[in-house]
Amino acid sequence: MPAINRRNMLGAGLAALAVPGATILNLGCTPDQESGGRRGNGARNTEALAADPSNMDDRNADKGNAMKIHYLEIVTPDADAACALYSAVHGVTFGEADQNLGGARTAKLAGGGMLGIRAPLRPTEKPVVRPYLLVDDIQAAVAAAAESGARIAMEPTEIAGYGQFAIVIHGGIESGLWQL
């Protein structure tokens, strides 16, 4: 049995994200206004969820406050091998390299998003898995991220035919924002 390490866990997480029809890509993440951001007794909620996963109380999604991953970017030194892996495991087909997306080859995600796999754009770019979440107002979202302590790695930038994107880093985690 292989040793469990961060790289193996990352691979398992990627596999979970890329499962066709996975609902993990539609997560509610705005605070519950009724409790000031707290969801009540965590132990009780955990017990209810463990007993019956369909008991998950997602008041945010009910209010229309659900996040949607529009673009899931994988940067890896061997993009062709990564595309072959996802094709073999999930039966998807990747398109040709799209220069507007940094040379990424893309495949569709359930729910209308895209998975893009590309090589690093510069020698210092490290492998990363970066979700880009849809936002209505990218300028306001970037400002809110900065106010929350995030470093803005890429200011809002237009991509011809795709909309605008930005990249924020908080706690070492890179996240993208995307406005259509």
Image: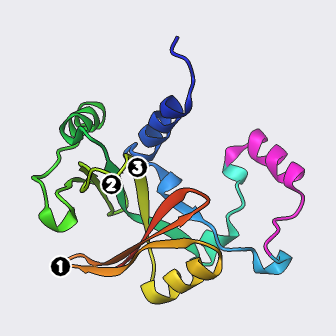
Please tell me which residue is depicted at 43% across the width and 59% down the height of the picture.
131
Determine the secondary structure under disc 2. loop
Q: Position of residue 36 (x, y in %)?
A: 82, 78
Which-is-in-front pick, marks 3 and 2? Answer: 3
Q: Which mark is residue 128?
A: 3
Q: Position of residue 156 (x, y in %)?
A: 37, 81
Examine the rendering and report whether any part of residue 180 can be seen: no
- Residue lying at the far front of the rendered structure: 124
Residue 85 vs 108, above or below: the answer is above
Secondary structure that dominates the magenta span: helix
Examine the rendering and report whether any part of residue 109 can be seen: yes
Residue 18 lies in quadrant: top left
Determine the secondary structure under disc 1. loop
Determine the secondary structure under disc 3. strand
**Left or right: residue 133 compared with residue 105:** right
* Residue beneath disc 2: 109
What type is the residue that disc 1 sits on? Answer: Ala
**Left or right: residue 114 compared with residue 168:** left
Asked if residue 49 lies in the magenta stretch, the reply is yes
Marks 3/2 in contact by CB < 8 Å: the verdict is no
Q: Which residues are magenta?
A: 37-53
Q: Quadrant of the C terminus?
A: bottom left
What type is the residue that disc 2 sits on? Answer: Leu
Which-is-in-front pick, marks 2 and 1? Answer: 1
Q: CA distance from mark 3 to mark 2?
A: 18 Å
Disc 2 or 1, which lies upstream in sequence? 2
Frontmost residue, 53 versus 175: 175
Q: Which mark is residue 160?
A: 1
Please tell me which residue is depicted at 54% across the width and 85% down the height of the picture.
143
Residue 90 lies in quadrant: top left
- Residue lying at the far top of the rendered structure: 1
Q: CA distance from mark 1 to mark 3?
A: 23 Å
